[in-house]
Amino acid sequence: MHFIKNFAATISFLLIVALGAFLYFYKLDEIPNGLYVDEAVSGYNAYSVLKTGKDEYGKPFPLAFRFFGSYSPPMHTYLTVPIIYFRGLKISSPRVISGISGLVLVIAVFFFIKSLKIIRSPLTPFLGAFLFAISPWLIFYSRAGYEMNIGFALFSLGVLYLWLGLKKPKLLLLGFPILSLSSYGAHTERFLVPIIAVLFLLVFKKVLFLSKKYLSSSLLLAFLIQLPNIYFLSTPAFFTKSTLFYKGAIFSQAEKIANFLPTFIGVPLAFIREFTSQYLSYFSPRSLFFLGDPDLQRSIPELSVFYFWMVIPYLYGIYRLFKSIKTDETKFISLLTLVIPIFPALSGDPFSSQRALPLLLPLSLIIFLGIDGLIYNRKIVYWSLTFLVFSVFSLLLLWRSYFVLFPKERAKIWGYGFSPLAEEIRKRPNEKFVIDQSRTKPAYIELAYFLEYPPEELQRSVDPKVRENYYSMVDFKQEYRFANMEIRNIEWKTDIYKEQILVGDELAVSESQQKEHFLTEVFEIRDPIGYIVFVGYKTNPARKCAATGNFSLYCKNQR
């Protein structure tokens, strides 16, 4: 009987992991439909490291990659290098590491739930791992080819081993070092890890200091891992994300009450008001179960970050957490839950699922705690069937929203159109192109990716001063010139007098400009629902000059 139970448990666990693998890798080249700039820049830099040992700027093996001036943690890009080696520059290549990270997270959550003494039903670890695997929040970032998920996976493994290390101190040798390593995974973990580590030491000091040997060794390893970050901390590049802080909103609010309160009081009050509003949004049922991320690029049509019905176990889980407030489990889950939203709440976004991704772990544990309370000793068959029905319903919602609506409705936002644009450029090697950059995300990296442009050539197109002052010259310029392309804003005074193709979105060239400057449409690229992404117009400088009586100085080149 014991063997049958173990066999059934193993099969159930493997089926959950298999379901996760399907959800994270199915049609990965097609969904998301396009290649977002953050994916393209990570993938191309992995390609550049593979081919030259340097990034796109010619910097050998940087500590942080200068992606559009953001200086992103390097782990995702370096781990993508072997993927690029075996698979090439496919759309899915930068996404593979995120998918693998998603599977690691599902496994980690299963063992996390299993280790909690306040979980009473033996079904809860399986049900929890299943619901975590199909979570919209996890699925979204497990299919996105940039750094968030690898950082989250390492962070979750780190805190899991810290938690287990309270009972088995040897595991601390994995906990603190892996947690430290996660700071090279994503921006959030870079700031979050030191705070979590210090607070963990303070909250559980009585237990931890009973195992000083393992504790000191693990902390030493964690510190050594942080040495590159400590160096990075001394450079201007470390502070580039400080621009996300909402100081403008704070001073604006302080001005409104300047007649009643002096500035030295008004500014702190305005900060407290803004921060509290942002912070509480990460616990709001409205944000978590009904609305989700307001940024269309970071959300799924008609789905929030959790399924709407989970609001019930979420609220019940909070109640159970308060009931067991003196337990180590409650202290640990509360520590994670209360600390993680601090850093996202300091940015300007009202609810950023990307910056708050690590919050998925403790919030999920709270939901599973609520589910456990509902199914344990409360008509287990009834509640199990209820959750089964809701789970099937959730999968149907997920399939409709993510695998049907998302690739159509969000294609343009996710960079759809650059692949066909690259084909248009490839078909015309003798033509010059001007790619309008006035309203698009940085186009140069998308085109370099899809054209498989040689990294050493792109490195030569960069100002050498950037390479020499890599961590101090932080301003990013979107204008690029390489191959037969110029990526910049269209200059109407000069561009119409040169033989070239002007490329832009539906607003780049008006109908009147097309007629006035004798532009001929040569191609048009639309997204899956028919919206224009790019239009290419060929200039006719000879006809333009003839129509204006060679009035412009630039017409001399046409005589």
Image: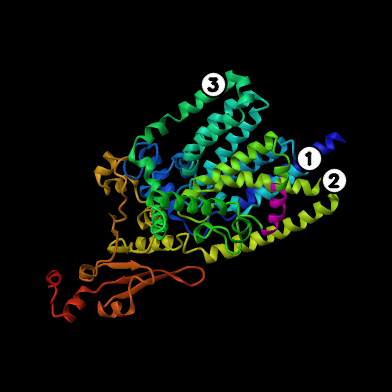
Specify the label residue 377 is tagged with.
Answer: 2
- Closer mark to the observer between disc 2 and disc 3: 2
Identify the mark nearer the N-term, 3 or 1. 1
Name the residue beneath numbered marker 1.
Answer: 120
Q: Is residue 240 left or right of residue 326?
A: left
**Which label sits on residue 217?**
3
Query: In which quarter of the view is residue 402 placed?
Result: bottom right
Left or right: residue 445 compared with residue 217: left
The quarter of the picture where the N terminus appears is top right
Residue 256 higher or lower than 72, as above or below: below
Tell me which amino acid carries mark 1.
Answer: Arg
Check if mark 2's residue and mark 1's residue have beta carbons within 8 Å. yes
Q: Tell me which amino acid carries mark 2.
A: Asn
Residue 331 horizontal/vertical position (percent): 65, 37
Q: Earlier in the sequence, mark 2 or mark 3?
A: 3
Q: Check residue 25 for magenta coloring.
A: no
Q: Is residue 22 visible?
A: yes
Residue shown at the point (62%, 29%) measured from the top left: 204
The alpha-carbon separation of the residues under discs 2 and 3 comes to 44 Å
Would you place residue 400 above or below residue 92 in this image?
below
- In this view, the residue in front, 27 or 309, is 309
Residue at the spot x=64%, y=40% of the render? 333
* Element marked by disc 2: loop
User: Which residue range is magenta in the image?
Assistant: 308-318
Quadrant in the rendering for residue 159:
top right
Say left or right for 383 vs 544.
Answer: right
In this rendering, the answer to whether 242 lies above or below 214 is below
CB within 8 Å, label 2 to label 3: no
Front residue (pair 317, 540) = 317
CA separation, marks 2 and 1? 9 Å
Main SS class of the magenta portion in the image: helix
Q: Judging from the image, what secondary structure is the residue with disc 3 in? A: helix
